[in-house]
Image (spheres, helix red, strand yellow):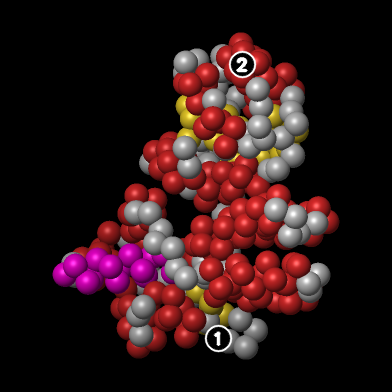
Amino acid sequence: MQTYRIHRFSKLTGLSTHVIRAWERRYGLVTPTRGANRYRLYNDEDVRLFRYLKSQGDLGVSIGELAEIGREKLLEQAEREFVATPIEPLPSENLVADLIQALQANDRIGFERKLNGALAVIPFEEALHRFLLPLQEQVGQHWHDGNLGVAQEHYASNQVKQKIFSAMNQLRMVEEGPRVVVACPSQEWHEISAMTAAYLCAARGCRVHYLGANLPIPELAKYCDQVRPSYVLLSMVIDRSDIEVKNIVQELTTQVRPIAPVGVGGRSAQVHAGLFSDQNIMVFPDLRSLDVFVFSLTH
């Protein structure tokens, strides 16, 4: 998880440093680590918890009463509220425009400095919704319009994928919870949506098996037969004919669904939603609906 010094933590939570120290001392809901220079370091869970405490305090709820609930229960309530409430987009358009401009100029240093700088001051999950996924979408559009080359598109995509994998690796390892397999079927090479789904599952307490791009359904079925997941999620974004999708649906229905329920997301899944729904394969229209579903699996 990212860590923040107290002044950055104050800006992220909307609480003064005096209040943060007082709540920390009085209620023991956070235990910041100490950096080599002895500065307090808070993490993303602390940010979410203190934002929730502030929101409840603004509604007139006593912080003392909240503290009696305990950190873990409060984090669960904070996460439930976060999942149920759509993120209001902050003005990140300028950042995305600057990143696109750096890509067009092949300014690697400028691109990575801006991207890493933004990630350093925003909790990752918010950054994902507010500029990482919008960046990826705009990069794809600029490539389609001929404003970016294939190499530039690959570079930007790999930067985003690295950030998601890094964030996943910083999440707490869970030994219990639903086991979820996430993959892309054959010919699907664009895996950022699948990686995002894997991150959300892991962040909500699932044991995630991320299998990546271009995985034939029979191989997926073999793997699922071994690990026995609670759920299987597939990302499908490339254009496919009805016949191609019907073949995928048939393979999923006969080979994977007898082992575990299946859900699909992505542009192609939306276009052919009826073919999936007719076979009781859940279709997720967006990441928000997936997030709400995954939260229901773990709580």
Q: Nearer the viewer, residue 172 or 110?
A: 110
Local packing at callout 1 (Cα closer than 10 Å; few below 14, some 14-19, many 20+) is few
Local packing at callout 2 (Cα closer than 10 Å; few below 14, some 14-19, many 20+) is some
Query: Which quadrant would the N terminus be assigned to in this image?
Result: bottom right
Left or right: 67 as drawn, with respect to 173: left
Residue 91 belongs to the span the image colors magenta: no
Left or right: 2 as drawn, with respect to 156: left
234 relative to 28, above or below:
above
Residue 49 belongs to the span the image colors magenta: yes
Q: Residue at x 74, y 60 (%)?
A: 147
Q: Residue at x 61, y 45 (%)?
A: 193
Query: Which quadrant would the C terminus be assigned to in this image?
Result: top left
Earlier in the chain: of badge 2 and badge 1, it is 1
Q: Residue at x 81, y 53 (%)?
A: 150
Q: Which residue is mark 2?
A: 246
User: Which amino acid type is shown beneath numbered disc 2?
Assistant: Lys
Query: Does residue 142 show up?
Result: yes
User: Which amino acid type is shown beneath numbered disc 1?
Assistant: Tyr
| Secondary structure of residue under mark 2 | helix
Instruction: Give the magenta-colored segment's residue range.
Output: 47-60
Residue 294's spot in the image, x, y percent?
46, 40
Location of residue 255 by image quarter? top right
| Secondary structure of residue under mark 1 | loop
Residue 183's spot in the image, x, y percent?
66, 35
Q: Nearer the viewer, residue 242 or 49?
A: 242
